[in-house]
Amino acid sequence: MSFQLLKKKIKEKKAIVGIIGLGYVGLPLAIEFAKKGIKTVGFDADAEKVKKIGRGESYILDVDDAELKDVVNKNRLTPAMNFCLLRELDVIIICVPTPLTKTKEPDLHFIVEASQEIAENIKKGQLVILRSTTYTGTTVEIVGPILETSGLRMGEDFYLAFSPERVDLGNKLFKIANTPVVVGGVDSKSTELARLLLEQITEKVVPLSSSQAAEMTKLFENTFRSVNIALVNELSMLCERMGLDVWEIVSAAATKPFGFMPFLPGPGVGGHCIPVDPYFLSWKAKEFDFHTNFIYLAAQINENMPYYVVRRTISAIYGNGIDPKQATVLILGVAYKKDTNDWRYSPALKIIELLEKEGLNVLYHDPYVAEINIDNKVYKSSLLTEGILNRVACLLIVTDHTDLDYEWIVTNSKIVVDCRNATKDILDKFKNIIRI
């Protein structure tokens, strides 16, 4: 297929789009294309996910069952596991996870596997877009060469671009349609095609000079958050030592109408981007004999916050005359963000691990997360009852879900350690709250 023909098909919404990876990024994207009348095929290696999509059943809180069922029933979205169907597509978008190894290095095996599947089935004239967050250079250095094993040439026989996801789970205001995106291709034609495609579903698409520029933009966005969260986390620890209220300080500073942007302290960072992206950036920088000391230090501060939370929790239990070795802690919220069910890289996981290493028994309650798995040990969410609150030595608020009655919770708890300022409206009523 020629450049002009693919361009025409995209403009007329006749291009068939395939999404590889139907998780928090891929499934909403697939639905958005389908809602616009663009025939979409969603690929995932998880057979259970594929079956659920076929029945119109969502496994993601941000995706409504009725919305999913509508596009499936209208045959606009087809779930699949057979990658041979890639040959029938005009556009392929990669939305697979990009975790870190245990040594904090990029683990791109999902991207590599997806690229290999595409290489085995690619045809001339297709557009491939990488949407997974990754280090600068992945598109041209990893994905492109794998696709070229097909015998086709990047930028000539097929088109290749990078456009990072900007998913904010639980955000009711900003969705795919009204969140601007950036895009950069390996050449001008790839950029143009990717821009035209994304303009079908997004109000504003910002073309950049290269795929590397788009990759660096994504890393900068999340490293910016990591660094600022680290700053306020460090300030939080200093304020504790000085006898000051960090929440009061941040709130006061936020009254300045210019030159300040409030970030809030917490038990650490979580999710699929902020804990990962600074390490992607630092790892790639070493290739250029550049050491991102400031960025790396910020990531370390955030990673150390669970240790600080555990120290404060054990201290609070001791201070209440209870031996921590005989104590049970109930963690409130294990999702990395309130009102979501995503617990990837949640600081709660490290907090549970550290508390158990100190000899404490740990339970958790999360209305959105029924169970979690830490090193092959399964934890199930406990019912939040007056009895369990009375029984545990300490309630530790890690995630401040909205639909919880914090006054009732505090009333029935011995000690409450609050990492999220969830109890700010009832502080004056209780003496058993310790804020971090």
Image: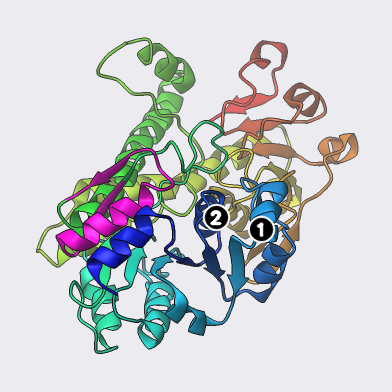
**How far across and how far down the image is residue 413, in percent?**
78, 31
Counting residues from the N terminus, which is met first, the one under dot 1 or under dot 2?
2
- Which residue is labeled 2 in the image? 34
Q: Nearer the viewer, residue 144 or 335?
A: 144
Residue sitting at x 20%, y 50%: 293
Identify the image's colour scheme: rainbow, by chain, secondary structure or one colour: rainbow
Confirm whether residue 383 shows in the render.
Answer: yes
Confirm whether residue 105 shows in the render.
Answer: no
Amino acid identity at mark 1? Lys
Q: Nearer the viewer, residue 276 or 132?
A: 132
Is residue 30 shown left or right of residue 206? right
Task: Tell me where residue 147 sits by quadrant.
Answer: bottom left
Amino acid identity at mark 2? Ala
Give the magenta-colored segment's residue range: 182-208
Task: Tell me where residue 406 sits by quadrant.
Answer: top right
Other residues around mark 2 within 10 Å, as few (<14) / some (14–19) / many (≥20): many
- Which residue is labeled 1 in the image? 74
Residue 203: say if magenta.
yes
Check the image and report above or below for 145 versus 226: below
Check the image and report above or below for 66 versus 204: below
**How far across and how far down the image is residue 5, in percent?**
29, 66
Check the image and report above or below for 404 versus 155: above
Q: Report the disc number at residue 218.
A: none
